[in-house]
Structures are given as C-alpha cells and as structure tokens.
Image (cartoon, rainbow, N blue to C red):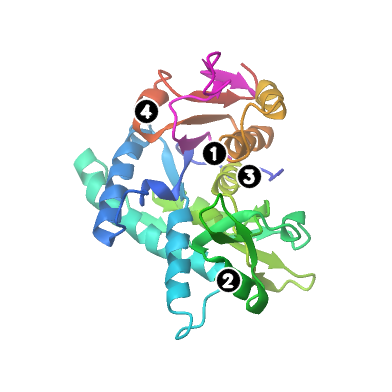
Amino acid sequence: MNPTPFFSFVRPLAVVAFGGNALLRPEDSGTVAQQLERAREAVRMLVPILGKGYELIVVHGNGPQVGNILIQAEQAADRVPPQPLDFCVAQTEGSMGFLLELAFDNELPRAGFRKQVVTIMTQVEVDAADPAFQKPSKPVGPFFAKDRAERLQREAGWTMVEDAGRGWRKVVASPKPRAVRGVEIAAALINRGHIVVAAGGGGIPVVISDDGEVRGVEAVIDKDYAASMLAASLSANLFIILTGVDRVSRDFGKPTQAELPVIDVATAKRLLAEGQFPAGSMGPKIDAAIRFVEAGGHEVLITRAESLSEALEGKSGTYIRAAR
C-alpha cells in the first residue's frame, strides 16, 4: 500500500475505524431503534475527536449486519433471488450510514457542534488475481446444517466450512485493497467542514478490467485495511482504530502481559512476526497501522471507544509511530 499523499486541509484530519458490533452487539435483538441508540452511543464517544480540532471521517464495520442480510436471503431464497455479496455490502453502507447520520444530527448540537454529515457509497478496488480468491477464508452469514451446506455448495457454488461445531458457514475471499475510489469527493467534503462516513464494511469490492470496466465481486474487505488506505490516501494526521481493549499488550492474557503505550513501526513489525498479535484479533489492526505509517502517515491510536477521550490526552491507548 503506497498511495501518494496529495491532499491538504485547513484543519487536521482524523480517520476512525470501528466494528459493526458497535451498532449491533451479540446480546441485542437487532431492531432499528436499538441500533440507532447504539449509533448515538458510538457518536458520543467520537465527539472528543472534534473537540481536539480534527475534521473527521468514520469507517464502520458491518459483520453482524451483512450476516443478517444473508439470513434474510436464505429464508426467502425460494421467493426472492439472493443478492451477491457486493450488493449486501452496499446495502449495509447505506443503512448504517443512515443510522450514523441520524446519530450525528441528534448528538452534535448537544455537544455544541454545527456540522453536516454525509455518507459515501465507497467502492474499493481489489486485484482480480489476489490469492485470496483462490482460497476463501472469511466466514460470513448464518450457520447451516450439513445437508443444506452440501446443497448450497453443489447448487450455488458456495465454499462451505464447518465452524467450531456450530454448523456450516459460507466462506468468501477477503482480498487486500488496492485503491479507494472517490477519495477526491471525500476530500472536497472534508474541506467544506463536513463529517464523512466512508468505506463502510471495508468498502464495496470491485475489480477493473484491462479495458477499464468496473464490476463488483463476491468478497469482503477488512475494514481496518480499507480505513488505513483511505487515511493514507487523504494524508490524515491521525488514524484511530477502536477495538475491545484499552491498550495493545505484549503476551496478552499471560502472567507476563505488558501494556504498550507507545511503539514504533519496527517494534510493531517484530512483535507481529513473533506472533504476539493473532490473525483473528489484533493482528490485522497492527498490520493496518503499520501500513498507514509506512505510507507516510503520522501516527495511529488503538484503544477502546470508551477510553477514547483519555487516549486522545495520552492517558490511555497505544500510539504507533514511525519512531519513538
């Protein structure tokens, strides 16, 4: 990932990425009203970024939301043709963007800010030759019984895997992003002082043929990688990754666990190579942080949403920089 920075803004820019479970948690019933309240909770935690003088771009995940769409498609499969995954991602970009716009519209005046919020349906280019397409690995959607999974594998061409004794799930490719389309539009909106919601769910994955034709593909993109590329493309001053812990730690969960308030890229790369950050949890976040800094970014902050205000003061969180 080596986008060439060419944007500059009157005020510093922060790009923040958080997971789809911020708006739809496992214990939630999933009603729109409940998701809207979760969105308002999330927005209240983001307000301190504005208080520090940053312009703001928000990148959200969509794992639970896409899963629900796929469950709906499965239940109605005999009446409505199922939609491809790129369409499902696009649906969540629109619906979750709408929830976040409502949340910002209602919470910003309470915090003393007058800003407009806009959601961009963001296409993210991937490589049609990415090895991920040859080895789908990202589980999505509902669990199926074995006979139903075998039928979907046979009739729909899905790749199915057994998931921890809970049933069979569809797995799809998760290629790395090559370019975020429409960054010029995002830059123009930021320059006008607007808050932008972009690259939701990692963006809608598209490939571009040799003759320039654009088409969606059956894949999902890791939202942290997409957010990292978007932040680097826009020359963001700060890239924030919200996760489930206050600080990144070495030897997480062991008696020797040690928090890491500040680490440089060289140390982050070494710890990642040593297996300190598992691929299924902190690994992609650290890798995305490294990619941002190596592409010219200033610094990355990794912390919990609930600790964000303190982390912006340097009292919590982990900062990753080119050098200490």
Q: Is residue 271 above or below residue 295?
A: above
Residue 97: quarter of image:
bottom left
Q: What residue is disc 2 on?
A: 147
Inspect the image, locate mark 4, and give the three-letter code of the amino acid beneath it.
Ser
| Amino acid bearing label 1 | Ala
> Residue 296: horizontal and vertical position, in percent?
66, 34
Identify the secondary structure beneath mark 1: loop
Crowdedness near tag 3: few (<14), some (14–19) or many (≥20) residues, C-alpha within 10 Å: few
**Mark 2 or mark 3: whose residue is earlier in sequence:** 3
- How far separated are the C-alphas under marks 3 and 4? 32 Å
Q: CA distance from mark 2 to mark 4?
A: 46 Å
Residue marked by disc 3: 6
Magenta segment, which residues? Answer: 235-264
Whichever of labels 1 and 4 marks the residue nearer the N terminus, that label is 1
Q: Are marks 2 and 3 in contact (CB under 8 Å)?
A: no
Question: Which residue in the structure is indicated by mark 4?
Answer: 307
